[in-house]
Image: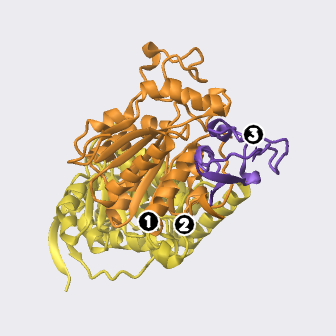
Chain colours: A purple, B orange, C yellow
Amino acid sequence: MAKGRIVVLEDRCKSCGLCVAACPVKVLRISDRINNRGFKPVEQFKEGCIACAMCAMACPDVAIEVYRIDE
Amino acid sequence: MSEVKIFERPKSMYDVITHYCPGCTHGVAHRIVAEVIDELGIQERTFGVAPVGCSVFLYNYINTDMYEAAHGRAPAVASAAKRVRPEMIGFTYQGDGDLASIGMAEIVHAANRGEHITVIFINNAIYGMTGGQMAPTTLLQQKATTCPFGRDPGVNGYPLRVSEMLATLAAPGYIARACVAKPKYVPKAKAAVRKAFQTQIDGKGFSMVELLSTCPTNWGMRPVDAADWVEEKMIPYYPLGEFKVPDGEVKG
Amino acid sequence: MAERMLMKGNEALAEAAIRAGCHYFFGYPITPQNEIPEYMSRHLPEVGGVYLQAESEVASINMVFGGAGTGKRVMTSSSSPGISLMAEGISYVAGAELPCVIMNIVRGGPGLGGILPAQSDYFQATKGGGHGDYRLLVLAPSTLQEGVDLTMLAFELAEKYRNPVMLLGDGFMGQMMEAVEFKECPIKESSKPEEWAIGYMGQRGKRALVKSLYLDPEELEQHNHKLHRKYEAMAQNEVRYESYQMEDAEIVLTAYGTTARIARSAIINLREEGIPVGMIRPITLFPFPYAPFDALPKSVKNVLVVEMSMGQMIDDVKIGVGKDIPISFFGRCGGIAPSVKEIEDQIRKIAG
């Protein structure tokens, strides 16, 4: 299984939650922070990202960048 | 140990935040169109035609030559521009009111003439920008502000399956329906969009991809529930797949 | 060397457009202008152009919008009810500052009306027709030769101002046959498409945006002011009219188009009788030639406006003339043209 991490471009996030629902390993959640547009951005809150990019594919706001970690 | 970035904003998308509602999958549709434009290397010779509707601001998000057309008329605008500049790649991006209501004559005739354009048709079964009225693609019993008791076929007829209708025409080269509401459908949606643009590049005629999409605000649902609604209610009525493929190919 | 040919009006206008470098025509059939699309469908392929028959006039004007966005010379033609259908599209073309030519071979209205000639689209042509604060530059030929010359001018002016230009004809003009000469037509004006049109993104380093939406109210106001500066420039530079036997005229007849031809014959006859009548014939209906009406010779005692309508241009004549000189109207409509004798009788009545 690949390993990865995501970067959330917080000011783009509109808190729609589609990525949270899409993530097969459930490492995403809506945070408690508020961005400059009043939305609570998503965050990766634990390890386990598999760099599948389902979150980024689901995101309508191109708010997620995905990195694959190669050993 | 090293890191490879495997997903980022496509180059032909402007780095701006869209005005679309949270969870509206116009954003996904825009992104896959931009990705395809990048991958095919056609940014500088592509023109798009934006509709009237929520996506009137398509031109603020995709960096190609752009027209903003009158409601429903994008296929006419694109047809003419393509006829005058056939070496360019032309696409329209239209909602369900724009394409299937006021623009029905324009889309049927552009398809029937086999215009070498690519149409991206966003079907979210409702009128978004104007606040949630019934669309030609609103499902039976679905409620909208102008069918508050649910769509009644006796009063408003049946939801229009545009892809199937246009696929009966001889001229079109590629017609497909895909879904952008959930990421599991997105790779196939992007492949369809790519095939549609490739059909145009190869000179194989009119191409259209109908993309089933969400409208959480006007459906009165949370984005995640709206995505489920597309899967549970829209896909059974609007089946995914290819309805017309260039000669010699097999439909997928 | 100019060739002199006997041609049907509609066909002469179409040929003039082709010679003016317009190689793209988008239109829909409607009586009495069908010879224009038919001619275009036969001859545009010869010059490597495109004739595209649209599914309606609505589609036609939107195709003109699309074609015009490339910076190439494009046109459409129609007749009254079809022009009504184009109203929204014309507004979009003007709002997006695109050059194009629209020919209206006017027929009787309102509604389905009749198929015979009229001049009842004056308001529609000169006061906008479609929504919003835009104007069309309107050219009204009186003979087929003038139609040919003004068609070529129409494309030049459309590019000069990046605005739609209307050539206002009528069914007589469209259907009659006359000898016309196609003069050498060097294309002098360019709208500089490399600066604004689609298809130059690599060259320009920036994409083109052809739009008319300005949601910010201040921006929209500025845009309207910008459009208006064009119309003011047109009023400064493009007014055209003909003065005929005006030096000592006591009665001024004013008419445009085919009506003016008929009026000219009446004037010739009346002058032989010693009645001092002259004519001011507007050639640009927008910008309207207010100046000659404002500065009528002191000899003028009466103005008679003659139109194939219930009276539309008369409003602009009244603005030009003011209150001091009586203005009367004579019109025929329904597809009927005033006869030379009818016009003579009107003038004789005024002369007393």
Q: Nearer the viewer, mark 1 or mark 2?
A: 1
- Disc 1, SS: loop
Q: CA distance from mark 1 to mark 2?
A: 52 Å
Q: Mark 2 — residue?
A: C290
As drawn, which residue projects farthest toward the left?
C6
Amino acid on which the number 3 mark rests in the picture:
Arg
Question: Neighbour class for label 2 at 10 Å: few (<14), some, many (≥20)?
Answer: some
Q: Residue furthest front?
A: A71
Q: Decide if residue C24 is on the left or right side of residue B34.
A: left
- Left or right side of C22 for A63: right
- What is the quadrant of residue C138 in the picture? bottom left
In three-dimensional space, the C-alpha distance between marks 1 and 3, rounded to whole angstroms, equals: 37 Å
Contact flag, marks 1 and 2 (Cβ < 8 Å): no
Q: Which residue is mark 3?
A: A29
Q: In which chain is the residue bearing label 1?
A: B
Q: Amino acid at mark 1?
A: Ile
Residue B164, how many percent across, how many down? Answer: 33, 33
Residue C128 or residue C68, whichever sits in front: C68
Query: Of circles 2 and 3, which is in front?
Result: 3
Q: Is residue C286 visible?
A: yes
